[in-house]
Image: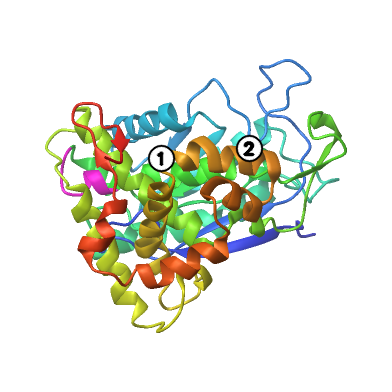
Amino acid sequence: MKKFVIFILFLSFCGGDSNSQQTSEQSESNEATKQSESNEATQNEEEIIDHMTLVDYPAKLYFAGDIPTEVHGRAEFAFSIIQEKLGKYPVEVYFVGTDENEKDNLSNLFCTNREKAGNFDPNDLRLNFRDFDDCMNFIDERYFSEYLRSSLETEQRGFQASGNKGHNGQAHQRYHLLVWSKPIGFEVENGEGYQIELRGVFHEYWHVFQIAHMDFYDCSDKDVRSTCEYNFDPPDYLIGGTWLQEGTAVFKEITILQEQIKIGNLNNIQVDILQEFNNQYFDGQRVMEQCPGMSIRDITYSDPCRRAVYGWGAWAAAYLTHKVNDPYIFENVYYPELKKLGDPELVFANTFGMTRDEFFADFDSWIYLSEEERKIVIPVVEENTGKLYYP
Ligand SMILES: [Zn+2]
């Protein structure tokens, strides 16, 4: 019998650097189903760990056996930076290489982790896997085989960094699943692909942070979590639009990289923040030729100009942070309020002092202004601290 899974598939170009065209298409998805077992209950009984819970352990990273050991530490470093900033949520990250047998070993490890977490239950297939084989089929067919193909393509085409990476849901099993194709950019510290991999980690973890602020449960009393049931309906309205989901992710990957450079955590990487945003702008402009007259508000992962949700989406995020004079408005206000209220329209209006309609009425023509007129929305990065501000 098949699991009942409500599946939102996002085709996207995540974590990409528009300069180098590293990225290939990928699927990012949220799966919404119900859940039962708690994993690693180190806390007391009433405290239920789910995808929204801050935990006291770091992201769990798992590497296929053909990924060099030097890469492990660099990937761990990248995750430690971003978890320090955005908080530690229950996350498992699987890095797939190019070797079939090693991919199968990684699938085995994934399913061993599911078994330990209590995710096998033939009597509740909405939430769980029937058994080990069911789990192996799921992870291999849906994800790891696909990422292995992407790893091979990355090598064949001589890309500098992993082509495919993504948040792949699993909130119903109370954690976030991230999957990566071979992170070859981490093979050489401070090499060409290194900063692309770092940005990819920052970008995907931002998606963890976003989803960690989306309450997919129906509760009779929201404060008593034991009264909550996982909601099977696709919670896509909580995302607030693809442009917001991806635009803020690109805004974060650029600004966090800037901050890391300024505080001296990264050597030999120098990128100018305006140049970064301009690259995003040109990328958006180029793809928008395929969707004349369209607003990024309406663009989805299936549109030919989908890359505009990244490129111009980043400018939309900057426009909004500038509007309220706070480059940290999304993590400090918008998402925490979204978690509380569950109403993106209302939270948007409260946070930015205008409705989404009012925002797009201005943004859709503003984005065509000259660089001189637009660049005031790009925050300044303070020397030594990397703190963002508007002068
Ligand atoms: Zn993304």
At x 41%, y 61%, the residue is 313
At x 38%, y 43%, the residue is 201
- Quadrant the N terminus occupies: bottom right
**Residue in front for this viewpoint, 280 or 53:** 280
Q: Which of marks 1 and 2 is nearer the N terminus?
A: 2
Ligand 1's quadrant: bottom left
> Eyeballing the image, is 367 above or below 324?
below
At x 17%, y 46%, the residue is 271
The answer to which image quadrant residue 278 occupies is: bottom left
Q: Horizontally, is 297 left or right of 190 in the view?
A: right
Res 18 visible: no
The amino acid sitting under disc 1 is Asp
Q: Which residue does the numbered mark 1 point to in the structure image?
A: 326
Res 378 visible: yes
Q: Which residue does the numbered mark 2 point to in the structure image?
A: 51
The amino acid sitting under disc 2 is His
- Quadrant the C terminus occupies: top left
Closer to the camera: disc 1 or disc 2? 1
Please state the extent of the stretch shown in magenta in the rendering. Answer: 190-196
Residue 359 at x, y percent in the picture: 50, 62
